[in-house]
Image (tube, grey):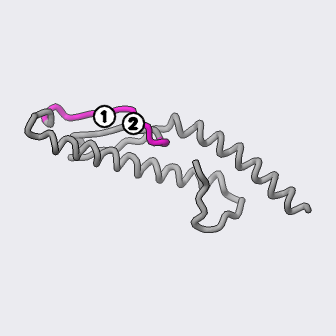
Amino acid sequence: MMDIMGMMKKAGAMQAKMAEMQAELENITVDGAAGGGMVSVVITAKGVLKSVTIDPSLLKADEKEILEDLIVAAHTEARQKAEGLLEEKMKAVTAGIGLPPGFKLPF
């Protein structure tokens, strides 16, 4: 019976930490760049796009496809950084809970 109570207490603490982490993730930003920095984006750790910066030299009609590809690449880089950040924060939140390897909690 004591093990169940201990597990419930840990689960409650983890739930509180998860809520705190979710709020924190809305304020953390990560950046991504492509084309040697000619295109950069800033997103929140939750993946919300905040800004796009484009070097003026790319604003030519005949380079439209290149610009589009660079925006996608910059966003992909930023998203990968955000996912890495989320993974680190989740490890901190779930420390001591004893989740099996590969178990992922929903966000």
Q: In this view, does 4 lie to the left or right of 102?
A: right
In the image, residue 51 lies in the stretch drawn in magenta: yes
Residues marked 1 and 2 touching at CB (< 8 Å): yes
In the current view of this chain or complex, which residue is farthest to the right?
1
Residue drawn at x 37%, y 41% as measured from the top left? 31
The image's mark for residue 73 is none
* Residue range (magenta): 45-57
Quarter of the image where one finds residue 2 = bottom right
Q: Residues within 10 Å of mark 2 (few under 14, many from 20)?
A: some
Tag 2's secondary structure?
Answer: strand
> Where residue 100 sits: x, y (%)?
65, 67
Quarter of the image where one finds residue 40 = top left
Residue drawn at x 71%, y 59% as measured from the top left? 96
Across the whole image, how many numbered discs are drawn on residues? 2
Q: How far apart are marks 1 and 2 (CA)?
A: 8 Å
Amino acid on which the number 2 mark rests in the picture: Leu
> Where residue 60 sits: x, y (%)?
10, 34
In the image, residue 91 lies in the stretch drawn in magenta: no
Residue on which the image places disc 1: 52
In the current view of this chain or complex, which residue is farthest to the left?
62
Report the front residue among 74 and 37: 74
Report the front residue among 107 and 77: 107
Amino acid on which the number 1 mark rests in the picture: Val
> Where residue 36 sits: x, y (%)?
22, 46
Q: Up-down: is 93 above or below 16?
A: below
In the current view of this chain or complex, which residue is farthest to the bottom?
101
Tag 1's secondary structure?
Answer: strand
Residue on which the image places disc 2: 49
Q: Residues within 10 Å of mark 1 (few under 14, many from 20)?
A: some
> Where residue 52 sits: x, y (%)?
30, 34
Q: Is residue 15 left or right of residue 26?
A: right
